[in-house]
Image: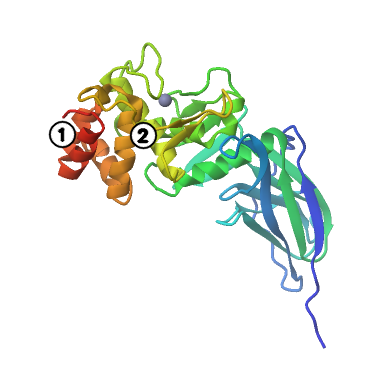
Amino acid sequence: MKHKARPSKKKIVAGACAVTVSITAPLLVQQANAADPEVCVSGELTAKSIDAEAGHVEKDTLVRNAAWELSGKTGSRTTTIVIRSGSTDDHGFFRACAQGPMKDAKLRFSAKATNRSQPWQVSPGNGSPYTFETTLGQVTKSEAVTASASGDVGTALTMIDTLNLLNRQRAIDAPLTVVWPNSQGPQWGDDDKMYLNRNDGRSKHTLLHEAGHYVMDRLNGLPKNTCPLGHGIHSRTDATCAWSEGFATAVASYLLKDPEPVYVFGDPQVRTTNLAPANKTRGQGNDIEANVAYTLIQIWRDDSGRQKTLDVIRDNRGAFDSVQAFLRKKQDPNANKRAEANGIVL
Ligand SMILES: [Zn+2]
C-alpha cells in the first residue's frame, strides 16, 4: 500500500539581533524540468514579542502578510537565485516550492507587507526592513519548517501583523515605514514614516494611533500646528488638537475591537485609560481627545465601520480643524446625538 511520506521538520530560530544576509542575485524564473518532482518547504511564521495589551508579557503571534523569499540552486545551476517569493497568508502560513531538489537553500522573512500597491515596513531606520534568514541546505523532498522570530525582529514582525488590521480596511494606498526604535517617538512624521520609542513597539494601541494620523494625513492632510503644548487623553486642549488626536486614538481602539474603549501605552508601561469621557460638560467635549475618540467609536459602530467617516474626510477640501467641522459636513442626526451626549456642541 502506498502512503504519503511524512515531511521532515526543520526549525528556524531568529536570535535577538536582525541578521541580514543580502541576496543580490536578480529574481529569475527557474527553468522547469518536467523530470524533477516539485519540492516545497512550508510552515507557519511565528514571532515572539512583549505584548502591552496582554500585560507586558511575552507572547507568540502568527504573522500574516509578511514577505518571504526562498533562494538557492536548482538543477545544474552553480549560482544562487531567488527561486520564489511571496507573503504569509491569513493564518501566517507559507509554502515555497521549487522544481526539483535545491542546494544551498535559504529562506528569508522580512518585516514587510504589501498594502494594495504600496510597501509597508518596520525598519531600524536604515531604509530596509528587519529580516531574518535561515539556511535549509540541501532540500531533496518536501519539508515542514518551523520559523520563529524573537528579539527585535520578532517585535518588528508582530508590528507588521498588527498593521494588517489597518491594511484590511483598504482605506489608503500609500507607503508606510515604522522606524523603531527611535527616541523621537511616538509620533507620525508626515514623511511616510512613524517613529516609535523602544517600549512603544510593545503597544498595539500606540502603533495604530500613529497609523490613525497616517490615515487622516493621506486622506486629506492633517490640521496644522496641532497640540503645541502637548496632549493627554482626558486633558482639555483645544478643538483642533482634540479632533486630530481623538481620531487617531479612536482608530486604535476601534480596530482592536476593545469591548470598552481603552488605550494601552507601551511606555509608561501598563497604563490603561478608559476612553469613555469623564467630562460631559456641554461644549468642553470639543476640546477633549477622549470625548472625540469615544464619539467617533460610537459613530463607527453605528455605521458598521469607518468608511462613511473616511469618505467625508477625503471628499472635503482641506483638513478639518475640529470634530464640529467634521460633524457639520457629515450631516447625520444620529452622529450629532452621540456627540452632544459627550459634551460636544455643534
Ligand atoms: Zn497622536
The residue at 28%/17% (across/down) is 238
Q: Is residue 8 above or below residue 198?
A: below
114 relative to 227 in the view: left or right: right
The residue that label 1 is drawn on is 328
The residue that label 2 is drawn on is 276
> Please, what secondary structure does the residue beneath circle 2 have?
loop
Q: Position of residue 191 (x, y in %)?
A: 44, 25
* The N terminus - image quarter: bottom right
> Please, what secondary structure does the residue beneath circle 1 have?
helix
Q: Is residue 179 above or below residue 57?
A: above
186 relative to 148 in the view: left or right: left
User: Can see residue 250?
Assistant: yes
Front residue of 154/258: it is: 258
Mark nearest the camera among 1 and 2 is: 2
Q: Position of residue 83 (x, y in %)?
A: 69, 54
Q: Amino acid at mark 2?
A: Ala
Front residue of 259/214: it is: 259
Q: Position of residue 107 (x, y in %)?
A: 73, 49
Q: Position of residue 29 (x, y in %)?
A: 64, 57
Residue farthest to the bottom?
1
Answer few, some or many: residues within 10 Å of disc 2's Cα (few below 14, many 20 plus, some between 14 and 19): some
